[in-house]
Image (tube, helix red, strand yellow):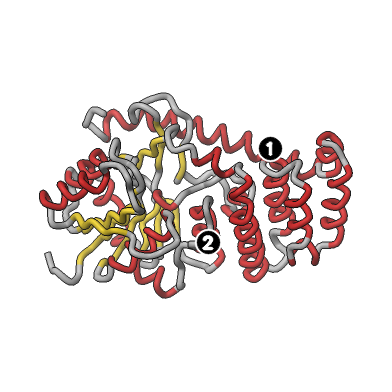
Amino acid sequence: MNEKRYSLAVVIPCWNCEAYIGEMLDCLLNQTFSDWKAFLVDDGCIDGTAAIIKDYVLKDARINYVLRNRTPKGAQTCRNIGFKLSEGAKYVVFFDADDLIAPYCLEQRVEYLEKYKELDFAIFPMKSFQENIYDENNWVWGVQFVEDNFKAFLNWNLPFVVVTNIYCRQSLVDYDLAWDERLLSMQDSVFNIHALALGMRYEYAQNVKFDYFYRIGHNGLAKKIMMQKHFDSHFILLKDVTEVLVRAYGEKYDFYIQNYILIFLFQIFCDDRKALLRMISMPYVKKHSLFRVRLVVYLALNRRGRSYIFSKYLRYSRSLRMQWEEHMKSNADKFRLESLRSWPISN
């Protein structure tokens, strides 16, 4: 392997993951593809994570331990640090420390971009799990089920996430796409929306196997997203997403942007008058007077009244959510039929 140039960088932020990091590292060492380097960026762990990673560094020189050396704290900063250290790689993936990958994962992804060189990134199927990868959990990502990915993202139905993707490293440099270090949550969605709005060339990989397995139920991120201290982060997110979409597409996504704003109100800050007033002050909302008037009226209504004046958005959101859940179930069933043949390693 050339010491300066290599095929794939694997960037993994790490925060108190001693219970799982060894499994991810074992997955890397068991890959059928060998031309990779991994950058595990320690976000200031206070458990045994660092010691475990350092043991693996001694086993394999392709594994690199990096301690985050600047603020702010967070996975997004760690990913930016890891990406900067990955100079020399042709491709890059961003994985999570507590997940699992199939032995063919890296090979499958690199071969796909080698075959379709016109792409900036490609998307691969992923399934969630709790105890083992074959459990009956109906959450899948990276399998196309909508024609317009923006509409899905703006309804919080994630068609793909960053761990499902492999990127041409130079494309991320050329498009100046990096992780937003101001955000406390949902950085993944913002990264993906920017990639699409910038016009990056991509496709869902065809005729490939599920290769990534997302562990759920232990980090509590969903609950944190709903916390008041995340509001500043959400406000930055809303302002950023509206600006990038309007800049790229004009009024095309107005209905879906407004639906996105309403989801935050109904699901997170429905009774927070201060939060609502701040949203009304957003530049996007100020430019859409009818929508702004409805938000002002929202202040004076109870939850039932609010649902009535925004019924069109809520009906759309529920309809797309039902379609998305059906898509999840059908593809999870497909995985259970295929996986026993494609991954002969018990888990």
Circle 2 residue: 182
Q: Which quadrant of the figure has residue 223? A: top right
**What amino acid is found at the position of numbered circle 1 in the picture?**
Ser
**What amino acid is found at the position of numbered circle 2 in the picture?**
Arg
Question: Which part of the image, by quadrant, shows the N terminus?
Answer: bottom left
Circle 1 residue: 319
Q: Would residue 90 be found to the left or right of residue 297 on screen?
A: left
Q: Could you say whether the residue bearing mark 2 is in a helix, strand or loop?
A: loop
Q: Could you say whether the residue bearing mark 1 is in a helix, strand or loop?
A: helix
Q: Which quadrant of the figure has residue 116? A: bottom left
Question: Which part of the image, by quadrant, shows the C terminus?
Answer: top left
Q: Nearer the viewer, mark 2 or mark 1?
A: 2
Q: Of callouts 2 and 1, which one flags the residue occurring earlier in the amino acid sequence?
A: 2
Name the residue at the top extreme. Answer: 136
For the residues labelled 2 and 1, say whether their Cβ atoms are less than 8 Å apart. no
The residue sitting at 88% across, 49% down in the picture is 297
Q: Would residue 125 be found to the left or right of residue 86 on screen?
A: right
Q: Which mark is residue 56?
A: none
Q: Position of residue 121 (x, y in %)?
A: 40, 60
Q: Would residue 331 be found to the left or right of residue 35 on screen?
A: right
Q: Position of residue 261 (x, y in %)?
A: 70, 52
Q: Position of residue 331 (x, y in %)?
A: 46, 34
In the foreground, 178 or 21: 21
In the foreground, 42 or 64: 42
Near mark 1 (Cα within 10 A), the count class, few <14, some 14-19 or many ≥20, is few
Q: Position of residue 2 (x, y in %)?
A: 13, 68
The residue sitting at 54% across, 43% down in the picture is 145
The residue sitting at 57% across, 53% down in the picture is 149
